[in-house]
Each structure stands twice: as C-alpha cells, then as structure tokens.
Amino acid sequence: MTELTLQSDLGIECVAELQAALQPHLEDDSPVALAGEHVQRVHAAGLQLLHAFVRDRAARGHQTTITLPSPTLAAAARQLGLAVSLGVDAHTGEPA
C-alpha cells in the first residue's frame, strides 16, 4: 500500500501542488491511502481534485481511501456531497 499525506492547505491556490503529488500514483496497482489528518483548509477545487483522483483510480480497478480525515476535510466533503465518494462517512466524518 502506498501512503501519502495530504497537505494542510487544499485551497484553490494549492491545487497544482496537490495534483503534482497525486498524479504519479494514478496508475499504481497497489491501494493508495491518503492521510487527511493535517488538512486545515479546503476549497471546492481541492475536493474536486481528490474526487477525480479517487474516481479515476476506481475506473482502473485501483483502491483509494482517505484515512484519518481532519474535521475540516470531513465537513467540507459532507457539505459538497462528496463524502461517500471520498470514503468518508457522511454522518460521522470518520473513514467509511
């Protein structure tokens, strides 16, 4: 399993950095775990990129999970209706 730590800022001005970190792992055959405990700031663009990464890996048959989502990340995912697609329980904010 490949484990990556998400940066603390997933704001729109940091999306290029996030994409650069995720892109090399799009084709990884092994599961990818994205540790979200340090995320303190989230914009829709950051969540959209995470959603696209998880979706595109799933389309290739590869598993991706977000582990330890921070309260900020979990709340943002719930508000934008992306909790389930990001592997976050829509009610508790815990990993699904």
Image: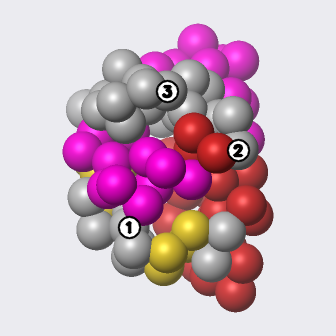
Residue 22 locus on image (x, y percent):
54, 56
Q: Residue at x 72, y 78 (%)?
A: 12
* Vertical placement of residue 76 versus 39, above or below: above
* Vertical placement of residue 47 versus 86, above or below: below
Question: Is 27 colored magenta in this rendering?
Answer: no
Q: Say whether disc 2 or disc 1 marks the residue closer to the N-terminus.
A: 1
Q: Residue at x 57, y 39 (%)?
A: 78
State the separation of the CA atoms marked 2 and 1.
Answer: 16 Å
Residue 82 locus on image (x, y percent):
65, 35
Asked if residue 33 can be seen in this view, the reply is no
Mark 1 neighbour density, 10 Å: few (under 14) some (14–19) many (20 or more): many
Q: Residue at x 55, y 32 (%)?
A: 83
Q: Residue at x 45, y 55 (%)?
A: 73
Observer-nearest of 26 and 4: 4
- Residue at which label 3 appears: 90
Quadrant the C terminus occupies: top left
Q: What residue type is disc 2 on?
A: Leu
Tell me whether the residue at label 3 lies in contact with that at label 1, contact meaning CB atoms closer than 8 angstroms.
no
Observer-nearest of 24 and 45: 45
Which disc, if any, is residue 20? Answer: none
Mark 3 neighbour density, 10 Å: few (under 14) some (14–19) many (20 or more): many
Magenta segment: 51-76
State the separation of the CA atoms marked 3 and 1.
Answer: 18 Å
- Residue at which label 1 appears: 39
- Residue at which label 2 appears: 80
Residue 49 locus on image (x, y percent):
70, 54
Q: Say whether disc 2 or disc 3 marks the residue closer to the N-terminus.
A: 2
Disc 2 on helix, strand or loop?
loop
Colouring chosen for the image of the structure:
secondary structure
